[in-house]
Amino acid sequence: KFESHETKPPARYTEPTLVKKLEELGIGRPSTFASIIQTIQDRGYVVKRGRALVPTFLAFSVTGLLEQHFSKLVDYEFTASMEEDLDKIANGEAERIHWLTNFFYGHHDQPGLQDLAADLGSIDAQQINTMKMGEDIEIRVGRYGAYLQQGQGDDRKFANIPEGMAPDELTLPKAIELLAAPSGERELGTDPTTSLPIIAKSGRFGPYITEVLPEPEGKKKKKEVKAKTASLLSTMTLGTVTLDDALKLLSLPKVLGTDSQTGEEITVQNGRYGPYLKRGTDSRTLTSEDQLFSITLDEAEEIYKQPKVRRRGVAKPPLKDLGADPETKRQIIIKDGRFGMYVTDGETNATLRRGDTVEAMTIERALELLAGRRAWEIENGGAPKKKSSRKKKAPTLTEETISDAGAKRKAKRSATGKAKKNK
């Protein structure tokens, strides 16, 4: 008897599932999870699609470098033990200078960071940034993004990997298709107004059209004139775009006229997220690319007369309603947040602890968690305040400020030590 079995790739991490995995490995702390997730996005290691965190080609390249040359530093057990050591230092149970000395210089026949970094110059950067696919095709990660290379020497072929394509979406047939696509420039004609040639070509962010400026004579001027460029619309391809299409695209942004109500100029533009109208600082999204060339001033004014619809996510329903707090009469519910499930009475939030489940959660346990959270807030000076968007000015480093900072750290360690002795 033959049975059919289908396998599915593991689901991509979301922020909550990544935090859960880090907790299981003993890596990170509640105070650092947000910065970890923000850092991997800021450095281009993952991009968000909806709630999913999608790894990039750069992430695979960096992972390869670390695993091949710094395997000790990215070992899960080493990282977890380091977190515990840092907790001890923070609690005054270990001495930071001694720990940092061992980490840098090594101890007990274990190499330190100094030894691990001694051979940085011998690392083959090209080998680290190359991933083989087959059919003599390689994925390479360069300064300006990921690209494909097929063959060696003078017969090499290159193709940009489209921005936003995830590694698991780049199959061998897709790579062959990208390499076979026309990569050269196609001249569309001459702009009758400027007499400049207009060409269509493929770039890192997709196909686009651009005017060709004449080569500058002599030394370049300080303010170099930039060529007009425009991305192709979703209905256009490099093989089908015409000179008329190109001239229309290069005419954007286009002034529709002056708003009769505000006296401000209204323009129609094509941006990264599609076509839109702009009046001063007020932008309105258009519903189709066709409107870029067909919308009139009257139609634009009608759009601006409508109240602006802000794109906000719909609040998720609670996972469970536990009932009302007997004292405050506030309704207590369980919600799924950015870093996992929590109970809330609308004023205080408390994360579910290990072993707590939605099914087994009772109002008594929820009240216990909320009381614990309130006690923590009182002990630590209240609930965490929202960060201000205004950046604080960094203090000027003087002997006085350095001395004050050292005194504050010393006083904090002393207070922590006394508190532990009194327990």
Image: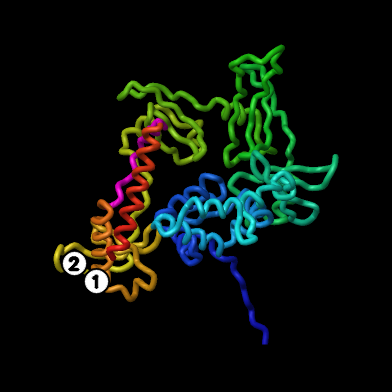
Whether the magenta-drawn stretch holds residue 410 is answered as: no
- Expressed as whole percent of the image width and height from the top left, the position of residue 105 reads 60, 52
At 38% across and 42% down in the image, what residue appears? 406
Please name whichever residue, 415 or 178, is drawn nearer the observer in this view of the structure: 415
Residue of label 2:
325
Q: Residues within 10 Å of mark 1 (few under 14, many from 20)?
A: some
Which of the numbered marks, if any, corresponds to residue 363? 1
Dominant secondary structure of the residues highlighted in magenta in the image: loop
Most distant residue in the right direction:
154
- In this image, 385 relative to 38: left or right? left
- In this image, 6 relative to 337: left or right? right
- Expressed as whole percent of the image width and height from the top left, the position of residue 35 reads 45, 50
- Does the CB distance between marks 2 and 1 fall below 8 Å? yes
> Is there any visible trace of residue 302 in the rendered image?
yes
At 28% across and 54% down in the image, what residue appears? 380
In this picture, is 340 found above or below 242? below
Q: Which comes sooner in the sequence, label 2 or label 1?
A: 2
At 82% across and 47% down in the image, what residue appears? 151
Whether the magenta-drawn stretch holds residue 392 is answered as: yes
- Highlighted range, magenta: 383-398
- Expressed as whole percent of the image width and height from the top left, the position of residue 65 reads 66, 52
Q: Secondary structure at mark 1?
A: helix
Marks 2 and 1, how far apart at CA = 8 Å
